Amino acid sequence: MTFRTTSASADYVEDVSPGSGALPPRAWYASSDARSLSLNGSWRFRLSAAADAEDDSFAAEGYDAGDWAEVTVPGHWVLQGHGFPVYTNHLYPFPVDPPRVPTENPTGDHLRVFDLPEDWPDLAEGGALLRFDGVESCARVWLNGTEIGEFKGSRLPHEFAVGGLLKTVGNILAVRVHQWSAGSYLEDQDQWWLPGIFRDVTLLHRPAGSALDFFVHASYDHVTGEGTLRVDSDVDGRVTVPALDIDVATGEPVTVPVEPWSAETPRLYDGELVTPGERVPLRIGFRTVALEDGLIKVNGRAVLFKGVNRHEWHPERGRALDLETMREDVLLMKRHNVNAVRTSHYPPHPAFLELCDEYGLWVIDECDLETHGFVEQDWRDNPVDDDRWTPALLDRAARMVERDKNHPSVVIWSLGNEAGTGRGLTAMAEWIRGRDASRLVHYEGDVDCRDTDVYSRMYAFHEEVERIGRGLDGGTLKRRRLPLILCEYGHAMGNGPGGIADYQRLFEAHERLQGGFIWEWIDHGIKDDRYGYAYGGDFGEELHDGNFVCDGLLFPDRTPSPGLVEFKKVIEPVAISGDGADGTVRIANKQDFADLSALAFTWAFQVDGETIESGSLPVPALAAGESAEVKLPAPPEGVPGGAETQWTVRAVLAEDTAWAPQGHVVAWGRLPVAARALPSVAATEGPVPDGALITLGPASFDARTGALRTIGSVEVTGLRLDVWRAPTDNDEGAPWQSDVRHGELWRKLGLHRMRHRLDAVESGGDALTVRTRVAPAGWEVGLSTVYRWTSDGNRLRLTVSVTPEGDWTVPLPRLGVRFGLSGADAVTWFGGGPGEAYPDTRAASQVGRWRSTVDGMQTPYVRPQENGARADVRWAELGGLRIEGDPEFWFSARRWTNEQLDAARHRTDLVPGGTVWVNLDHGQHGIGSQSCGPGPLPRYYLNAAPAEFSFVFSEVR
Ligand code: GAL
């Protein structure tokens, strides 16, 4: 005899169907005149440990929830003190046995009592809908004691007809939310698992004759310059667009001259759909998306995506975003020259798409679908290839397309992410094409492009991208005729991504390459008193993927990371280049649509990094794709000999725009004129023994070890060769990367524990020479290192000569000297800035005169790692010392050692000591993107090779 003990009342949780009771999906809009009532706010809340631990009596009228906790809706209960968030990348955090889920299934009962506003229309007039914009992962809903349905599809809207159930006062809305459900198998995106009612809950009045669903078709004919508008509506009515003199019936096409919509010129026309019972505002953008000549074209022109992947994230509220946060994302994107966004990996809050329409961003709208965990069983039993799940997939596709179809910004539908391949995906693609032929279909997992209109890849190495650009990659006939986009590249985890300028060069060189989307927009760090920001594992998860969830161009608080500053420069819409000595600058408009009339140009002439004269530069309003040589003014006179001079030409906004003020810098270029004179120190002094010390010019040294002690009154400790850097996430590489991972090799070789053997201190003639051998225990490789000190009485010159010994098969992390200063705060330098740079992340580094502080020079990566180096530094001043480089050097300073930085797991582990540690590097190894993607290109390797470099020290008084 067998017993089935599962309560039948919770069976829906493990049912593969999308649910029951919800209305068919339709366009999402805010009515002009129909009433609505937000049910956001404080709700009563009770957490239980299993789907059926509590009965449903809480939904009944008269239930007393007075002793329940409260949570804020929209929100996730795990971020409001009930349970904990869980982070996994692709592994399901529960046993894989679809559609079954664990018995331990955190279940949140939510209760909200509400009255209708006094001016709410008579309940007999029209109906009412209850709309949930997003609930993770499965919800069952009751209104006034009557069950109205249950649903899955976390980031998709669900509406229920509730008119007949409403009362004027004392309505009781009860929602039971289960963290795990059959739907969880379709939502295995790389992010925190965050249950809850995390988007708005709204009651919508539906007057008789109100609009139900409508589809705005607004195309643009780039040959005639005309747009054609047709609004299909379930309820007949009229469509007006005053600026275009349009007043037509629904379903009737009208063609008029228009200004087209593009991400660069987001021209929207305000219109209205008027049905017998409702007025609906329309924001219409005319544009035509087509696959033509093997290219994605909008309004007849191929577009280049300079995109980012955006998850919804807020460090305190998770995926419950308010409008201001969404707007901040859009403004930050626009201000950093981003022109496209893939809504990885689910449709965003609908208000985000309204912002994309308004400010101008191309959108790949992605369905809420990922089954990545099945890769571990070679995709066996993958729901997307199992007909039983197809209704759920089609439901998800329809909920996305119907909700978002009226947004001009959405140019491509994406079936989902990392879900293998299968019949379910094909069914989704077919349904989407049947419903909306005006956009293209994307899915990265479809390498043969059976179901897609674009060949999409993630993290392809530069070499392969180039082969694809040249059409040498083979593949199916269909694929060979399609353009490539990198739906993910440039993995922005920790310090990096490196090599994005090299990708951009490829995109711009081969028309088949239509750009890409950086992974990803923002770090998903959770604000946490213990750690600053928490990542995977910080909540005791039994399975987790650590800080792989912090891989964005923004820090969790939305401060741009150096990666975003670099990206902004790499994708700038205007190229400014030239040789400053010949007095002309080349300006190229790299946009796809807009001319340069929105921009003004300025020039500045700089001497040793300081601007001495500046002015405006007249530049013609070049059309998209055009370029011109523009004459610079005559350089200022009286520049002292030996000074370094350069022009900096900037393209700035000519007027205030919706996204940035007048003067905002969009693009810039540096045109060098004269190089600086390298520092020279005549070796006029010699070393002088002085008891336990040796003095040389302004400096003193330990007579036995040759160690530098003081320069003038400045104490210096521990100056010696340094090759170690706290490995970056990209140095460490992802465990699944098959190619070399340098972080691991460096540790294996012991580069973090180099020993310094003293071979000789030679004090003779005009120099103090210290000979050493720097090498790790256990290996025969080493670096023969000679420090040669000379002085002219005031200044002290150090020349370091390094000769590798043995068979060095790995590059060095860094090569330079480091030393400690007993105090330093303010820092000034002439060189690259204002932010950090590394060999393959240096496009945004501007040569100039910069000021900061030791603390200000740190980049606060959520997991501490090498950071903060300034490139091309000619000289720097800190802690009473001036340091000049021959040649230029990489400069960093911090209140902890590289070893302490390496040991830290969170920012809070970094405790400032009394010493400021300064690194002056002759070389740094490239950064690459190997936390998910290629390592540094070989040209950015810091190979162990003979090297000689010098610094000149003097005391600044
Ligand atoms: C991709 C995936 C993303 C994310 C990224 C690595 O494979 O689509 O969701 O996991 O890798 O951060």
Image (cartoon, helix red, strand yellow):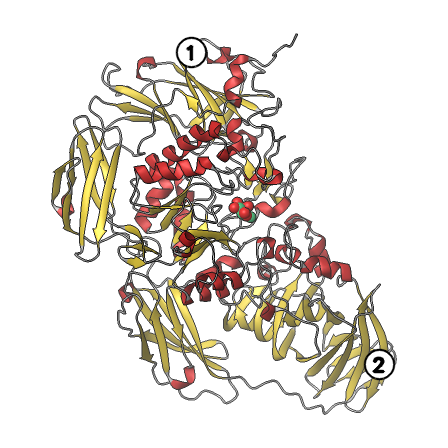
Within 10 Å of disc 1 (Cα), the crowding (few <14, some 14-19, many 20+) is: many
Within 10 Å of disc 2 (Cα), the crowding (few <14, some 14-19, many 20+) is: some
389 displayed left or right of 772: left
Mark 2, secondary structure of its residue = strand
Q: Which residue is mark 2?
A: 761
- Does residue 18 sit above or below 663 in this rendering? above
The quarter of the image holding the C terminus is: bottom right
* Disc nearer the start of the sequence (1/2): 1
Mark in front: 1 vs 2: 1
Q: Name the residue rendered at 60%, 40% in the picture.
A: 378
Q: CA distance from mark 1 to mark 2?
A: 89 Å
Q: Which residue is mark 1?
A: 145
Residue 498, how many percent across, how many down? 55, 62
Under mark 1, the amino acid is Gly
The quarter of the image holding the N terminus is: top right
Q: Quick one: 800 or 700, which is closer to the camera?
A: 800
Under mark 2, the amino acid is Val
Q: Quick one: 19 or 641, which is closer to the camera?
A: 19
**CB within 8 Å, label 1 to label 2:** no
Q: Name the residue rendered at 69%, 67% in the picture.
A: 812
Mark 1, secondary structure of its residue = loop
- Does residue 230 sit above or below 59 in this rendering? below
- Does residue 338 sit above or below 47 in this rendering? below
**Label at residue 565:** none
Residue 495, how many percent across, how many down? 58, 57
Residue 68, how many percent across, how many down? 54, 18
